[in-house]
Image (spheres, helix red, strand yellow):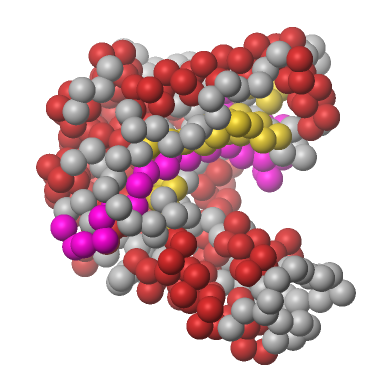
Amino acid sequence: MHATAGPPLTEQDAEAYLARHAFHTGAPRLVGLRVEWLLRDSTGPGRAVPAPRVESALAAHGAPRHGRHEVAPSGAITVISPPYRDLGECVRRTAEDLAAIRAGLASGGLAPLPRAVDPRGATTAAAAVRVRLDVGHAGSGPLGFRRRWALAHAVGPVLLAAFANSPTTAGGGWRSIRQAMLLRLDPRRTAPPPGGDPRESWSRYALDAPVAPLAGPGTVPVGLTFRQWLRAGHPRRPTLDDLNRHLDTLLPPVRPRGHLELAMIDGQPADGWPVPLAVTAGLFADAQAGDEALAATERLHVHREPYQRGPWVRAARHGLRDPHLAAAAPDCFHIAYAALARTGAPPAVRGAVADFIERYVARHRCPADDTIATLTGGGTTART
């Protein structure tokens, strides 16, 4: 049997750990991100890109100076920024890291794919831009963690729809097949958690989710939830290491990892990642932006409940062609733009947001629509 270090957990230990480590409260000051790239072989289109080749290309010329990188077994690469106090600094230093990574990849005949899924049909390969923000204050005010948790779920479908970049024309068509694939998995592991107090809601969600094969020994029965494993203690008692591996397999669109990780945004064309970072940071910039964004997205959610699956499914399938998302998105983007100006974001960042609004949001389009138009012979019609 697979052995795991550490003493056995009780159910009460697990609940206390989740409450303590999932939401680190404090003044919301920091912003960071993970940029994921799928790769293509520029010397032989269609070839798989194995991880050793990526590591070899980066070994001599490609290490990030400020953050760090990870290479998946599939060959996909992730660049992870540290948390920054200033959005402009985050953009500038992450751009430097990505430029170094790109140069290293190019030296090995590799380049990033412009889409968030692998067009060769490897549906397990998908890329995202994951924005990381502070949880917020411990209190119940507009910058408190409860309000910011609710805001993340309220604006999440808009961010998914506007930045959808993993299209498929099969099955009626999806703008974000990456998110569609997640939604089709076990909703106990991929759907948004239920409403209520964030700490209690997340604890229930995490413990009542089935244990994935990679989160424990192979002898854990299929479908066993982590709570059931804790209570049964078979085939052995789970430990904190087991719980942390289990948490890594949970894939809701918003994950509390000490900070909030907004994971619903598709990977963007190689230089497009600053826009979703800036828009998200703008929506969370201050109490005014948060209040306005909650009001702008209220009509998306039945009974004012932002944790239902409906808006997420519509966003993944239709992008900004969905009329409710199309109505909310311009408001959200303009709220974010105003907040960026109010908080002194660099002109270049604000300009990139303005260009995205003009090219996509104002036309009820997303990056996936460009690809769909090309695949169906319609050409790119984002600019008219």
Q: Quadrant of the C terminus?
A: top left
Q: Is residue 266 visible?
A: no
- Residue 113 vertical placement versus 85 (above, below): above
The furthest residue to the front:
7
Whether residue 152 sits left or right of residue 234 in the image: it is left
Front residue of 30/304: it is: 30
Q: Spot the residue most to the right.
A: 1
Q: Position of residue 199 (x, y in %)?
A: 37, 69
- Magenta stretch encompasses residue 139: yes
- The quarter in which the N terminus is drawn is bottom right
Camera sees residue 112: yes
Where 156 falls versus 366 (above or below)?
Answer: below
**Residue 353: where, in percent of width, then height?**
30, 22
Q: Residue at x 31, y 71 (%)?
A: 197
Residue that appears at 58% across and 83% down: 10
Segment tinted magenta in the rendering: 114-141
User: Residue 340 location, x and y as percent?
Assistant: 22, 27
Q: Nearer the viewer, residue 287 or 192?
A: 287
In the rendered image, residue 269, in percent from the top left (x then y), is placed at 51, 22
Foreground residue, 366 or 21?
21
Left or right, 299 with reference to 313? left
Position of residue 156 in the picture relative to residue 128 (left or right): left
- Residue in view at x 54 percent, y 56 percent: 251
Choose top left, top right, bottom left or bottom right for residue 232: bottom right
* Numbered circles on residues, count: 0
From the viewer's perspective, is residue 111 above or below residue 87?
above
Q: Residue at x 12, y 42 (%)?
A: 288
Residue 267 in the magenta stretch? The answer is no
Residue at the bottom extreme of this rendering: 232
Q: Main secondary structure of the magenta part?
A: loop
